[in-house]
Image: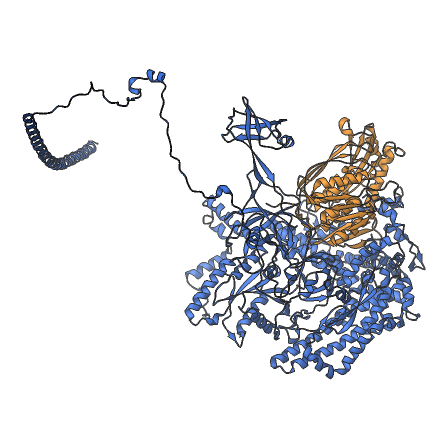
Amino acid sequence: MEKKEQKRHQHKHSGPKAQKKNRKKEHGTEPEQDERKRNPRAFGVKSAVRMAKTFHRAQDIKTKKHHIPLVDRTPLEPPPIVIVVMGPPKVGKSTLIRCLIKNFTRQKLSDICGPVTIVSGKKRRLTFIECNNDINTMIDLAKVADLVLMLIDASFGFEMETFEFLNICQVHGFPRIMGVLTHLDTFKDNKRLRKTKKRLKHRFWTEVFQGAKLFYLSGMVYGEYQIQEVKNLGRFISVMKFRPLVWQTSHPYVLADRMEDLTDPEAIRLNPKCDRTVSLYGYLRGTFLKNKCQVHIPGVGDFSVADVSFLPDPCPLPEAIKKRALNVKERLLYAPMAGVGGLVYDKDAVYIDMPCGHANKQQEEVRPTTELVQSLIGTQATLDVKMAASKVSLFTGTAALTPEEVQENGKQNPMESLEWDEKAQRERRRAVFADQDEEDDDDEDDEEMSDEEEEEEEEGEEEEEEGEEEEEGEEDEEEEGEENGEGVATLTKEDKTAMEATAPPVKKQKVEERAEMPVFADSDDELEKSEGEETEDDESDDEMEEGKPVKKSSGPDSGLCSEEDDDDDDDDDEDDDNEEDGDEIVNSKMSSKHPEEKETEDAEMGYETAGALQWKEGLAEKATEAYLRQQRAVPNLRKQVYGTVAEEGEEDSNDEEELGGLFKVSRPEKSKKVRADAMDCSRFHPDSSHDWDQEEMLASIRDCFVTGKWEEDKDAATLLKEDDDLYGDFEDLETGEVHKSKAGNKDQAEGGNDDEKNDGGDDDEEEEAPQVKFDDAEIQKNKRLEKKRRLKERFNTQYDDGDATYFDDLKEEMQKQAELNKQEFEDMDDEVRVQYEGFRPGMYVRVEIPALPCEFVTNFDPHYPIILGGLGASEGNVGYLQMRLKKHRWHHRILKTRDPLILSLGWRRFQTIPLYYIEDHNGRHRLLKYTPEHMHCGATIWGPITPQGTGFLAVQTVGGIKASFRIAATGVVLDLDKSVSIVKKLKLIGYPYKIFKNTCFIQGMFNTVLEVAKFEGASVRTVSGIKGQIKKALRTPVGALRATFEDRLLMSDIVFLRSWYPVSVPKLYNPVTSLLMPVGQKDTWGGMRTLGQLKYDLGIRNKPNQDSLYKPVVRQVRHFNALHIPKELQKALPFKSKSKQMQAKGKTPRDLQRPAVIREPHEKKVAALIQALSSVYSYKNKKAKAEQNTKHKEFLKQKEKEDAERQKRLKEERKKTFRAMGQKEKKKLKSSLKGASKDN
Amino acid sequence: MEFEGCSCFRQRLVLSTLSGKRVKIRNIRSKDDNPGLRDFEASFIRLLDKVTNGTRIEINQTGTVLFYQPGLLTGGAVEHECHAQRAVGYYLEALLMLGPFMKTPLRAVLKGVTNDPSDPSPDLLKITAIPLMKTFGIDGDGLEIKVVKRGVAPGGGGEVHFSCPVRRSIKPVHLTDPGKIKRIRGTAFSVRVSPQMANRIVDSARSVLNTFIPDIYIYTDHMKGQSSGNSPGFGLTLVAETLNGTFLGSEVVSTPQGQGDPVLPEDLGRNCAKLLLEEIYRGGCVDSTNQSLALLYMTLGQQDVSKTLLGPLSPYTMEFLRHIRDFFQIMFKMDAQKPGEDECRGGEKVLVTCVGAGYSNISKTIK
């Protein structure tokens, strides 16, 4: 639609309007006066109520928009987004993934196995994972998904899996859900298609939210979805925003995309069922992962991590963001389980995915390279010999050190365990430390160095090999294939650079440190050495310390490990730079350093370089001193706390003697035994060297008081001056004095100040290098910035903050916190940074887990996701959980207490036995036998401690599909405890056997005297409602008791006592180990069966209660007794009420019998006649009466009619007369009025 | 987790309770003439048992091995008879650490020795620890330490009430600038001695501090009768308050009756004032007794960066840092800050930084 150009308004230049305007202009007074002022009435308050209402409404709307502000903790480089493609079988999941991958990376994947990570854009990476139809997988993936692509077969409609998955998602925090309709090409009829779409859309909306995105994939072209549609979908995905989910943001997790068995092959050979050590790889998501933390692997169980290390990103984001789109090289794909992106760099090895078919061909063609590799494999064993021969010179010009010399210091060596790496086709060495000591690393280093040297060569070759191999493989393929090949090639190149970017620094550092150590031999290294000689007790501590190094160094070879202590130091150390030249001479490897890195490193240590050079030139003695002091101060503190166990206070360590100004004497520490049982006291006893009677000491803290000197920027005088600066000149109206701003002066003063400051800064740099790391320019700049900031702040407080709300403040606070979080460790080396922060999300980590069941490895199936879910503090423990639970409305049956149920809670899936309860009005938790139909109820389980507020869902079985809707219940955790308070009702029944007035002896309620004693004072009741109390036990019979009642009991009364009996929750916590099941049977995990199921399976039937059996109904005839009234009463009764009992008539005696009368014939005739006559008469009478009756009726009718007529007439008449009367009255009134008026 | 020896006994048990990790401590005074746990430690374990639910404690026959499996913190009203070997502060310090993470707000009544030379007194904790806790978002009217009866070592007979509200999570803090000291306050107490003692203490303390700042006020607190405990004694607690709300405290108590030489109140006052100066010299935003408390709250905060400026780390704090690393895998970044040449602001400071563990109170019930 093109917009029609509208004609602009023409201002009048002549006529009355123009004149009016001109007049206004001339007057010049308030031409644009405020409407409100001009027309106050229009804006006045008409209704206070209405105003209040509008105000309320406005505020409501405003506040509704607010969310609780959260600190933004997303890392700078976020991990790939997990996209779970879910749907019933045969709906097109794999096809969709394939199409999307092809869309993003131009590569074709044949088999989608495990997670596939791709780079989709400049700032976004995606991990696709397919979710099969197993409910275990659905549950696991719903917990890690950021986006769910929910595939729906439109030709069939929704399937239960879809709804189940939606419900799972709902419980575990709702990730983004996008529906995708497939199989739309099966509709031939357009109208039906439209209708189906609409129907499905609306159903989908009710489930997700109104307006949820539903995508339509209309049809297939050559077994793929249409390119345009896939492209659109891809666009949607790559711009999608995600909300943070509570569980995911508070727990670290890894969706493993690679698994490796590290177990000693010999151990496996001896015992194939031995526990395995496995390393899992993947991007870290969620929050920071700490080393040595506990993780849960859904489907396997809880494990503690032995070691975490980060690796170079196998699928990195493009480095430079200048271009508009990614070029082909940057479109990376990483899917180790699917067997692409075959080349993988590990910290200690390179893995190449070699298809068997190609391997042989390769062998012939690239013989020389392979030979070299082969030879390397051959020489691997002789490394020790090589090492022994290798020499390292510490200083340029000094004699080279041989490993023997170095080893003299060390006591223990790492044990070597050889492993045959199938993938790399070579033996790999694993350094196993029986008892790791910091000492070892010195010699280990050399080993490492040479090792790595070789490895580098090897890698290079392998890369080449790989590239060629790939090309070889892809040659027969067509255009697509070529693209693919190219992709791989680029990938290798990319990786090479990545390798160079990441691995060499490590190496280099090592070298540097080796060289550096003797030069500066800071005390700590010495300490470490001395520690090697310490008693065994120390070793346990050392092990603890070792934990930290391992964290960083990642590999089993702890070549780096113990050194890291040093190398944290040296991120501040200047030595690095000093030694660089020397190192380069010593080791040619240094030259291989990337120029880029150099830059970054220089930048990092920029401030040090200057000092270093000075030192080198030997110009400023001072600098060296500052240097040393710094070296002592900062790292020492750290080392003192975390490094070696130095128990002396820091003063002591500072007081240590120095030898030749460089070396320090380390003394053996006090025996540990004394320390171990030291007094536990938080008092910090004062330093005895401080004598507070001396003036200097007193002077040294003078500035801590308000009475002391203030900092320059806070000094009252300075502040005043600044005020002048800010507000300029003003005139004191009272005195008439004019204050001028002294800008010029000030500038001068400032300049002078700055100079001074600069000098000070220089001094500072020398004296207290740790804090002041800036050169002069930077100081100035910072000062200026600071000043600006303060000015701005002041301005803001004056003008802006008036309407700042609590919410705004909160948000700002969060913002600040987020910035601080980002900045605090930003410029640190990753190796050091992970120690402070833990591994941050977005890193590609390798997690080593020991003691995994062997089935995990032997039954490994890449189609099932492996998730490492980190557990928070005390989430690894087990306890009682109270939760609010509701049976799902779509589940057919109610749930029974004490039936095992499988819960998905937190990361875990486990079987447990819940007890359902309901809370009474008095807070009592009363046991329920079944869950209510449509109501929430409480449930208590014995299970893993999970933070309150976590949602869970319950299924009855995870094996197979039996129920129509598998999710049985959902709910939320309310409380955690170590004891339960569920009770059930208990009625004890007793019978009175002796009754006094209100006291009664009761038996049958208890069995022993003790039982009675426990219930003394308890209230009892009879069925008839008489209340009483238990008083005391009786000696005989046992269990009898005395009770008093409010009324006298009858022997027939039943007494009962109502009480509550605590129920114990069965301690069943059985993790669902579905991943350990054999391949193909992973969805058949059974677990504990319910009682009903067991009985059904075993064919056991309960014997029915005899009373509930049906018997033939026999009804007895009811017999009533006669009413008997006593004689006395009968006599007293009045005659009327006397019972009218007649004596049964007996036989009349003969004398009383009357003789029968027999008529004469004549008499008979007379009687007959009279009879006849009387009947005639009566008939006549009857007839006459009837006639009369009818006549009378007629008459009545007539009369009624007449009456009605008359009434009517009368009414008419009356009406007439009344009307007449009324009129007359009116007239009268009128006339009277007239008359009156006339009178007036 | 396994440890050796009984040093840092409280730290280990408290951290174990908070982290849920079980602890085994071996060789408790195994080489000692009197091996095994002492009475006050047993009393401490009993106190932990009272505030928790489901705690499992196993001690071997000689008392040299302790196994502690923590339960969940319940809180509520707790009354505990503290053993007289250690002061109430010994127990109170642990309760301060555990208090905010209970199921129900804690109302503890601790009876025993309130003041002794080795442990911080409830007075000191009241004026230094409570404001510190408030900066971490643990505030509200429930937070209070009250000395109802004062009982000096060795007799004891004191009573302290401690109540603490419950929090679900702890705020991160940025205490980097302690500010300048604006006033000094204090309490001089005396029980079962002449009330004049307190005044003498006050005078001597003032004489030292007056050179720095005029705003000094020291209350005298003489307790009589029921609330004066079983032994005679006197002492002084001083606190320096800065503009930014930092409280640095010091205290000195007279030597317990029958243990060592008696001290003059004048000397005691001067000593305490000097201790306060020492504390000021050390500086930082948290005083030396409460360093570990602040570090713990920083550790248990949300997953954000917290920063605090401390004075030199005490050996106890260092041990605590190590334990935090063991239990929570959290390391602190420590930057030493040296005072400038010309400024007279005490000794070297340490800026400690850490990322919180994202700990949330798992005991608190939601409805």
Residue A632 placement (x, y as % from top left): 86, 57
Q: Nearer the viewer, residue A844 or A889?
A: A889
Find residue A1143 and report its image quarter: top left
Q: Nearer the viewer, residue A1104 or A926?
A: A1104
Residue A754 placement (x, y as % from top left): 79, 58
Q: Nearer the viewer, residue A1091 or A1107?
A: A1107
Question: Is A142 rendered above or below residue B127?
Answer: below
Is residue B293 something one can see in this rendering?
A: no
Residue lying at the far right in this picture: please name it: A660
Q: How many numbered marks appear?
A: 0
Residue visible at 39% across and 35% down in the picture:
A1116
- Left or right: residue A308 versus residue A1223 is right
Find residue A445 and report its image quarter: bottom right
Q: Colour of chain B?
A: orange
Residue lying at the far bottom in this picture: please name it: A365
- Left or right: residue A898 versus residue A632 is left
Question: Is A678 rendered above or below residue A423?
Answer: above
Q: Colour of chain A?
A: blue
Residue A18 placement (x, y as % from top left): 44, 61
Find residue B84 and report its image quarter: top right
User: Which quadrant, please, contains the C terminus of chain A?
Assistant: top left
Residue A867 placement (x, y as % from top left): 65, 61
- Left or right: residue B106 versus residue A182 is right
Q: Nearer the viewer, residue B245 or A556?
A: A556
